[in-house]
Image (tube, grey):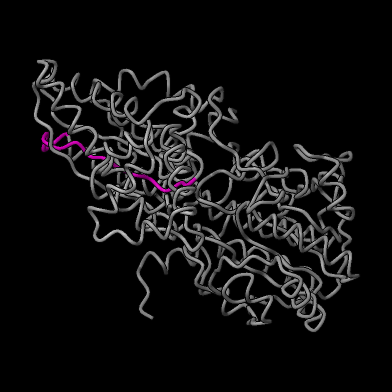
Amino acid sequence: MELSPLQLARYAYIPKIPSVLSGGPGAIAVELGGATESIADREALRSLFPGCYGKPVVTFARGDGKSNRNKLNVGVILSGGQAPGGHNVIAGLFDGLSAGNPDSVLLGFKGGPLGLVDDDAVILDAATIAEYRNTGGFDIIGSGRTKIETPEQFARSVATARSRALDAIVVIGGDDSNTNAALLAEHFLREGVHCSVIGVPKTIDGDLKNDYIETSFGFDTATKTYAELIGNIERDAASARKYWHFIKLMGRSASHIALECALQCRPNVALVSEEIEAGGQTLADVTETICASIAARAGRGMNFGVVLIPEGLIEFIPDFKVLIAGLNDMMAARLGEFKAQKDDEARDAFIRNALGGASGALYSSLPVDIRRQLIMDRDPHGNVQVSRIETEKLLIAMVEVRLAALKAQGKYSGAFSSQAHFFGYEGRCAFPSNFDADYCYALGYSAFALIANGFTGYLSSVRNLSAPAVEWVAGGVPLTMMMNMERRHGSDKPVIRKALVELDGAPFKSFAAGRARWSVETSYRFPGAIQYYGPAAVCDRPTETLLLEHPR
């Protein structure tokens, strides 16, 4: 493989870590908080996790220089979608193990949790780790979305842990993956398997966080990557002065990415799904918000602009949620009739008539391509695949219809031309920012410290992240502390609750304070490319979200 100059330079980067971790394993002591509780459904979760529930929060402190020097066999799993910095988590874990005892072994289970079930692993030695330090991606061992949930999968995981004589497994993943880690930790305790399970908070969506997990890794790099692209488009829009750019941003459930990019770039319109749902806004209301900005700017001779759209927007629009639920129910009950229709036009008419009422009217108002996506592109369970709906193109079509009506009423005299974009995969495997390189390394080292001190059922935690890295606080949080029960596939399941955008939180309030001016004026901000070398104020600056939520 031919390496780029930046890749070679990044190999030499030494991550900054909390001072409490800098002295090596022998300098780490453990401080325990009081017993913890889950965020909801406490009795149900206590009964499901009798071995792991109620454990204390762990904080690391300066130790006395003595440490357990036992050789450890540890497995690591990359689970779910990629996020920048995953390789540095593994590097931090490896360095901690090596410092604790040079004979310790780190195994990488290939292809996600399925690697554990199938006992498919590779030894990660110093030479292998060296090739991946400070780089993006999960390609060191690959990732996967398998959930360990059947009795057979749990039994095979137990067999792998025993045959490999594993002392611990580290699961690097998001809320679902770490819920699975908690279930695995509890199962191991129940079966008498002496193998701890530690999670690491990963997701670019930014929806795995709480008081002890201030941000998930990858969010910093991904949003800075998207913000660079958005800033470039803003500059282009202000130069050409002829296009409205509709940009959909990854983030299936929460709008943290769209909100962070809005704070960095100050577009003319940025939609926040949580606000739209809270306000009961319809698709027509959302369209009106965009058209108001377009008309106001046209009145100033500015027929250009930028709109940011969260990926999961339509699942938060109340009338669209009702439409999707109605389509799913109707398809489940009348699939045979639907398939019997002679052509696409007949199927479309069948759906309109079958829905009726407000949902039928909304369905009829949608562009033909979107209607086809809703009725033809379905998952194995027969449900609409919402993530595949091109929301940016839907909104463009709705805006065009509304602007034509406004023009006929004499309320709009501008010219509207549009461009559609989706930024998603571009940010998931970027070279991690200095922040993510540092944060991930510290998370990996902290995971080692949790293992070395015999903890299981914990999520590695590094907080005080708006401060310089040397002041960060490392430790661990019980996974059950972040859980509640949710209805999944007809039954109640324990899950880590997703953290949505808080409308009374500092990031949203900051955005809300500026958006009226951004809507009409050209107030664009250009973050530029991620910088790795230079002043700390440029290279080590965390996200606007983190700075607003945890001011210094």
What's the residue at 60%, 68% (across, down)?
146
257 on left or right of 454: left
Depth check: give the residue in front, 27 or 485. 485
Give the image location of residue 520, x and y in percent: 24, 20
Residue 33 position by quadrant: top right
Give the image location of residue 276, x and y in percent: 44, 28
Give the image location of residue 307, x and y in percent: 29, 35
Q: Is residue 256 above or below residue 163?
A: above
Depth check: give the residue in front, 427 or 308. 308
**Residue 533 belongs to the span the image colors magenta:** no
Q: Range of the magenta residues?
A: 238-252
86 on left or right of 344: right
Total numbered badges shown on the rendered structure: 0
What's the residue at 84%, 67% (across, down)?
188
Depth check: give the residue in front, 383 or 193. 383
Quadrant in the picture for the C terminus: top right
Residue 399 position by quadrant: top left
